[in-house]
Amino acid sequence: MASYVPGSLPEIPEFTPPKSKRNKLALEAIAVLVSAVAIWFGGCAAVRADSAQYYYDPAGRLTVVVDPANGSAQYNYDAVGNILSVVRKPITDLVVAQASPSRGRAGDVVTIFGTGFGSLADTTVSFNGVSASPTAVSATQITVAVPSGATTGPVSVTSPAGSATSTASFTIPTLGTPTIASVSPTQVKPGDTITITGTNFDSVVGNNKVLVNGRYAQVSSANATTLTAVVPIVSSGIVTVVTPEGTGASSSYLTVTPVPYAPSNIGSVVASSIGNSVTLNIATAGQFGLIQFDATAGRRLAAQVTASSFGNGVQILGPDASVLGSTTSSTGSFADTAIIAQTGTYSVFIAPGGNSPTGSITIKLVDVPPDLAGTITAGGSPVSLTTTGAGQNASLTFTGVANERVSLTTQAGGCSWTVTVLTPDKRGQIYYNAFCGSGTLFTDVLVLPVAGTYTILFDQSGPTTGTATFSLYDVPQDLTATLTAGGGTVPMTTTAPGQNMSLTFSGTVNQSISLTTQASGFSCWDMKVFQPDGVTQFYSTSYCGGGTFFTDVLILPASGTYSILINPGSFQTGTLQFTLYNVPPDATGTLTAGGSAVPVTTTAPGQNMTLTFSGTANQRINLTTQNSGFSCWDMKVLQPDGTTQFYSTSYCGGGTFFTDVLVLPLSGTYTIKINPGSFQTGTLTLTLFNVPPDASGTITPGGSAVSLTTTVPGQNMSLTFTGAANQRVSLLLQQNGFSCWNTYVLQPDGTTQVYARQDCGSGNFFSDILVLPVAGTYTIQVNPGGVNTGTITFNLYDVPADVSATITPGGGTVSLTTTAPGQNMSMTFAGTANQRVSLLMTLTSGLVTGCSPLTIVQPNGTTQLFSNNCANYASFFTDVLVLPVTGAYTILFNPNSLGVGTGTFTLYDVPPDTTGATSVGQAAANYDVTVPGQAIQVTFAGAASQSVTVTVGRVSSTPSGACFNITTKKPDGSSLRGDGTCNNGYSSGSLTLPTAGTYTVVVDPTSTSIGTFSVGVSTP
């Protein structure tokens, strides 16, 4: 193709010379076309056909043909282009064929083509009469510079052969290079008209070329200073004006909106460059944003959304407005690599709308490094490639032969990435998968269709970088083997990921079989069993996990050879051991309600059990099953019609299973079907019981105890009692023989529960207080939850109101006595904010059982000031409590279980701690504690790193020999040392003070102790 540089002629390639009239006409047609291109740029064309040269004027007409063997021919035309004459001359005659370029300014170098030229010494040239000095001359070419003062006109040459003048004029431009001052408007849509203001535009419309971002815009009007043009479908960019005299460009981008948006939809436009982060703010719904940037051909670009509150898509637009890449506007999204095909201005378009039509978005334009490349060998070592820039991908090539079996693993991080395997022609895929997450992607076996070089493409779709490790395996043929029903175990071991297994076995129609597969090395695998026709699938499963897989019993539909196909679904290799069993008919037996136990034994995995028993409508039964050998099994009990399911369960574990009581819906023969759900064999011993009516009776609140006894597993217990609304009762159960049971207390409606609880173990079980909501007859139901029988003794207590009193801080003791299990104690006292109190509670022996909670509640009735769930000591002391608010406080004591007795309470009004001050080396002084809960606090000044010894003595105490705690506190209140003693005296030993400041010695007598104590601080 012809190429053009402003101020020069296009270069025209050489053509094969014409050998016939047809060829000559074709050549001339091509020459005319090329000349038309040259004319577009304001020049002439010269076409060479081997040694002959053809020259054309700006109108595209053939003007001169020069043939070194036959001379020249010059074509003359009239005003409308008709040939007037053809002048033929010998090769030695002087002919001026063409000046190239055909226009230029003073100093521009021009080549003159023709014949009969002389030498540099005897050849002269003039441009419209103005002499010029050639710099090089040959018989057919002259090189000369345009002289100063030359004007438009013909070129003349004088040589020893004579003088000659060109038929075409050489043009001396009168205009300068165009410049652009402004473009209006600055924001447009395709199809809008722009006005370009500047200088040196050509007044002839066709002599001005306007480009927007490298795309031609149709010029509609022109004068020396103004052009108008219609904007094509293009993205934002520089406006360029090209005239025969040169090129001018705008200093800023013309913003062109993507179709179908208008300039009124523009919310934000920012000019940026690759490598920068740009934040756009969209304040109005329906508006969009643009980021404009320049890029050169061959550059690799990606865009990453680093922050966004905007809710729509992001696109990278090329100079022609085509979409090169896209992503969502959510934070972290990524527009993958776009390869810049041509130099120009590109745009990032942030579309309007979405769930969040306003907000801000920050986008970073990043340079993407070249993709990584390498080679890998099937059966060779793994190959690792590490990407370093967002959007960078990787590829590996390997050589394969037709029908070769390979498999590939790819280990990489991040989400997501794709792996593609291309055929040697790079037009077909033999594998593609998109993967999300860290870990290993496995292709399974791939059969290469042709010989050649295959390509593995690794594409990270996000900004993730890191290392991907590829392993390419040479996969041998699948393993094969034969199984025999009832025969031995067949092991098969794979040696390469992707290798599968195939086994065959012979079977007959209606034959019952089962298959076990024991895995070693595989995490998951797929199994398919095909009928003898090789296509109909008889059985399939996917299994994950270690240990042994079991098909359960399979009944063969036809006689012939069956195929088992195993596909390990991962990149692991390992061993599977196959065992095919002949499964005999179900083991059977007959049960009798109330009769003996019946053992049933299986002999092959997959064999089930079927038992029958006769029953009558409304008969109460239960079934126990004692297991030996099975880990799990399913049981179904079918009604006499053989299909309706009456009872079902799945059980796992050893020991004895128990159905609980079952009420038969109708008379007839029932069927029990048991399916051991594993490959084990073993024995189940079944016993069917006739269950009598529930043991029942009546009980009276506050009356005597009542005992009930069950005689058969499944038999329950029921007691009724009469109660009044708001009556308070409590229930005690003493059981013998049961492991676990459920207890329910039902309201008079027979369904609503007042109380429900499950208990296990021996001993006493107590309900605590129950407040009856309505008057009527209540029911106590007990359901023993196992195969045991036994006796439960019930005590139902009529519980009086809680005992209560008031107590005064610093006042006398208060005693409260409970008379029935479940009865509680409460006391109230008035207190003021910041008042210090302590509480002593002593209990008689009947209340010192189990754990009994003691709580002190604040005046709001809910917030706890103090709580201890095990305050069931003969003597319990709270230590000092500081009241947070003024008001009436409540002391609550809830005796555990069956406890009744007397509690005696003393509430102390505790004065502030006794305080004092001493110094290191000063004699010890005595301090008094007068109320339980009061302490002693003595301060002393200490220096950093000073060594001191703290001594405390018990001068007198009540009770004698009272124990006390000693804490030496740092100036910040934290403990330097803490001890406790029941001796008469205490010494801390040498203490090194960490900082300078005021230290405090705290002496706190334990429990209710009071007395006089000496405190001193000395130097060791």
Image (cartoon, rainbow, N blue to C red):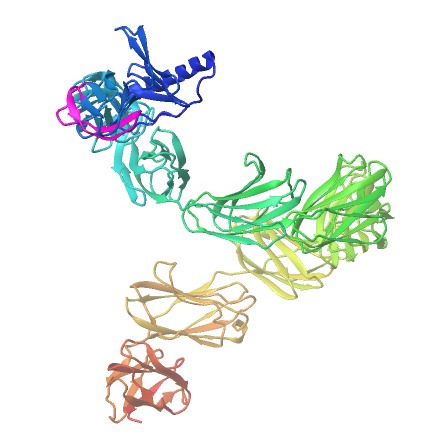
Point out residue 910 in the picture as x, y percentages from the top left corner.
31, 76
Would you identify the image quadrant in which residue 993 lies?
A: bottom left
Residue at far front of view: 160
**Numbered circles on residues, count:** 0
Residue at far left of view: 149
Q: Residue 129 or 853: which is nearer the viewer?
A: 129
Residue 831 lies, with reference to residue 1000, above or below; the image says above
Point out residue 511 in the picture as x, y percentages from the top left corner.
85, 41
Point out residue 92 in the picture as x, y percentages from the top left corner.
31, 19
What is the quadrant of the N terminus in the image? Answer: top left
**Residue 1015 seen by the camera:** no
Q: Is residue 1007 magenta?
A: no
Residue 184 lies, with reference to residue 329, above or below; the image says above
Residue 34 lies, with reference to residue 494, above or below; the image says above
Q: Residue 941 or 828: which is nearer the viewer?
A: 941
Q: Is residue 146 magenta?
A: yes
Point out residue 654 in the picture as x, y percentages from the top left corner.
73, 59
What is the quadrant of the C terminus in the image? Answer: bottom left
Residue 721 lies, with reference to residue 809, above or below; the image says above
The reply, left or right, for residue 197 in relation to residue 580 is left
Would you identify the image quadrant in which residue 364 lies?
A: top left
Magenta residues (range)? 127-153
Q: Residue 551 or 20: which is nearer the viewer?
A: 20
**Residue 962 seen by the camera:** yes
What residue do we see at 20% from left, 33% from top?
A: 251
The reply, left or right, for residue 649 in relation to residue 284 is right
Q: Residue 671 or 689: which is nearer the viewer?
A: 671
